[in-house]
Image: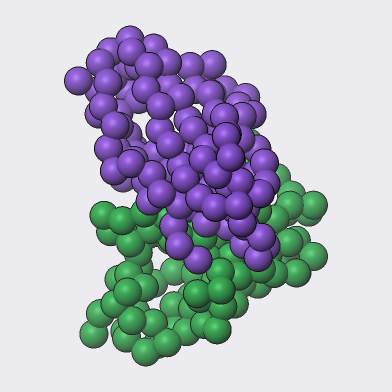
Chain colours: A green, B purple
Amino acid sequence: QVQLQESGPGLVKPSETLSLTCTVSGGSMNTYYWSWIRQPPGKGLEWIGYIYYSGSTNYNPSLKSRVTISVDTSKNQFSLRLTSVTAADTAVYYCARGAGWWGDWGQGTLVTVSS
Amino acid sequence: QSALTQPASVSGSLGQSITISCTGTANDVGGFNLVSWYEQHPGKAPKLMIYDVSHRPSGVSYRFSGSKSGNTASLTISGLQADDEADYYCNSYTSTNTYVFGSGTKVTVV
């Protein structure tokens, strides 16, 4: 059973860059898609985007100008960068395995955008 | 990219069956058999319950079933149990090669 674990700062200042890493254990990253999904407090889920193990990406159009997802299969990690953050980016950020449906999820990490 | 429409809440008694709807358009739910459903308990990560409209992952109870008609997908929970009380979200692939979640439904077991 693959396990995913998000890591990164829990507090980011407005206009700065949010950076998170997801570490995958218990399985190879090869041949899979890897995704980021977020959930503002008390609200619904939002798909951010995914990356294939080989590096191709696909992003939510509403975030595309600010999002970069990258992968390092040698470290069994993939990462999320979100630039120019505002309070609206405050959310629990989940990493997950898959592209169209997600069977394995990390526990999620709360990122708060505040000065 | 607007969220798919789900009822805010659905309730049922122990042992009853309930159905949660997920309404989109021909550009998402109606156009592809790529709808999935997730159960989320408070403070927990979502759990995949149904994928590709009606397929149940290994380990998910047979009490959960999915279907689709036109632009509306549905999740049915039969034999409602106390532990089914949670939030449920649908998700669909779209014609722009992206994915969109539903607005979410809170299921209450009365």
Q: Is residue B51 above or below residue B1?
A: above
Q: Left or right: where does residue A95 sit relative to residue A85?
A: right
Q: How many marks?
A: 0
Q: Is residue A109 above or below residue A1?
A: below
- Report x, y in % for residue B103: 38, 51
Q: Is residue B18 above or below residue A96?
A: above
- Can the viewer see residue B38? yes
Q: Quadrant of residue A38?
A: bottom left
Residue at 43%, 22% in the rendered image: B77
- Report x, y in % for residue A86: 33, 81
In this rendered view, identify the residue nearer to me: A5 or A36.
Answer: A36
Residue at 61%, 56% in the rendered image: B27
Q: Is residue B84 above or below residue A104?
A: above
Residue at 65%, 72% in the rendered image: A70
Q: Left or right: where does residue A62 sit relative to residue A56?
A: left
- Report x, y in % for residue B108: 25, 29
Q: Quadrant of the C terminus of chain B?
A: top left
Residue at 27%, 37% in the rendered image: B9
In this rendered view, identify the residue nearer to me: A108 or B102.
Answer: B102
Q: Quadrant of residue B58?
A: top right
- Can the viewer see residue A21? no
